[in-house]
Amino acid sequence: MPNEPSQMTIPKFRAMKAAGQKITMLTAYDYTMAGLLDATGVEGILVGDSMSMVVQGHPNTLPVTLDEMIYHAEMVGRAVHHALVVVDMPFPSFHLGVWKAIDNAGRILKETRCQAVKLEGGTDQAEVIAGLVSAGIPVMAHCGLRPQSVHQLGGYKVQRDEDKLLADAAAAEQAGAFAVVLECIPAPLAAKITAQLQIPTIGIGAGGGCDGQILVTNDLLGLTSGYVPRFVKAYADLQHTITDAVTRFRDDVRSSKFPTPEQTFK
């Protein structure tokens, strides 16, 4: 299906940096939420492997499978008409060699309506990024805190190795990535990386100097229970709203206040 005039494309996404326009991205894992987000005009929607934690209840992103990512990405793709849809490549779908990575990423593009994939890595994944791009698969890179490497990193920590972070971001750009997510990096360093790259940087816990920002939608809506990262700003308290609505429904049923004649067929 041809791109609609207002549909976000890879070239449009990249051009926003040069135009000085900030980029907004959020996560989605299902049809309903994806449609709501798309209607707001956000530029990008990520089907994130954060699904492993947000939807499936795991302690980290490692358990989610490629088939599960494709299943949810297909739902999201059917709901989105304007935003750029990017799908995370789950662990270890891009660690098995370039050809296997192309095969796995190809499945994502063929079986969903997404336009790009995202993978964690910089210098260590430059060959894979280049291979995917050469196969016509747009790649968003992810540097800084890499949740799939949580065991190797020793937990979810701010990443401060300037030389490594600069090298990773540069390697991702040189390999052909069209954008790079910078996660949990000191703001001055993220701004420095942003200034040195020609491609957009999308920050999450990396300060306002990035070209754009992304959050997990459940965090933004106040749906997250327990620990919430410092970099999150909750714009709503839907956890309380939902709990209150369900409690009132429960009470109305128990007291025979629901259904009323207005909700009843005659």
Image (tube, rainbow, N blue to C red):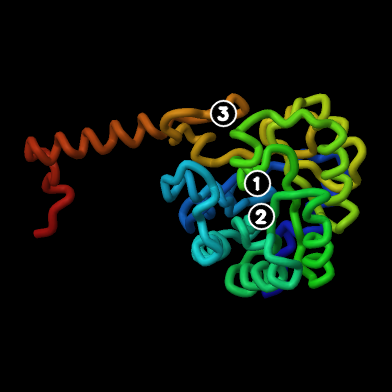
Q: Quadrant of the C terminus?
A: bottom left
User: From what the image shows, is residue 217 above or below residue 119?
Assistant: above
Q: Amino acid at mark 2?
A: Ala
User: In the depicted view, which residue is nearer to us: 101 or 69?
Assistant: 101
- Give me the C-alpha separation between circle 1 and circle 2: 6 Å
User: From what the image shows, is residue 76 above or below residue 200?
Assistant: below
Where residue 146 sits in the image (x, y, percent)?
A: 67, 42
Q: Are marks 1 and 2 in contact (CB under 8 Å)?
A: yes
- Give me the C-alpha separation between circle 2 and circle 3: 26 Å
Q: State left or right for residue 129 relative to residue 24.
A: right
Q: Quadrant of residue 223?
A: top left
Q: Quadrant of residue 201?
A: top right
Q: Amino acid at mark 3?
A: Pro
Residue shown at 46%/54% (left/top)? Answer: 32
Q: Nearer the viewer, mark 3 or mark 1?
A: 3
User: In the depicted view, which residue is nearer to us: 197 or 3?
Assistant: 197
Task: Give the number of the disc on residue 42.
Answer: 1
Task: Give the number of the disc on residue 229.
Answer: 3
- Give me the C-alpha separation between circle 3 and circle 1: 22 Å
- Neighbour tally class for label 2: few under 14, some 14-19, many 20 plus, Cα within 10 Å: many
Of callouts 1 and 2, the N-terminal one: 1
Task: Give the number of the disc on residue 89.
Answer: none
Where residue 152 sits in the image (x, y, percent)?
A: 64, 41
Where residue 196 sits in the image (x, y, percent)?
A: 92, 38
Task: Give the SS element for disc 3.
Answer: loop
Residue shown at 62%/68% (left/top)? Answer: 108
Where residue 58 sits in the image (x, y, percent)?
A: 44, 46
Task: Give the number of the disc on residue 83.
Answer: 2
Residue shown at 69%/49% (left/top)? Answer: 43
Q: Amino acid at mark 1?
A: Val
Q: Quadrant of the N terminus?
A: bottom right
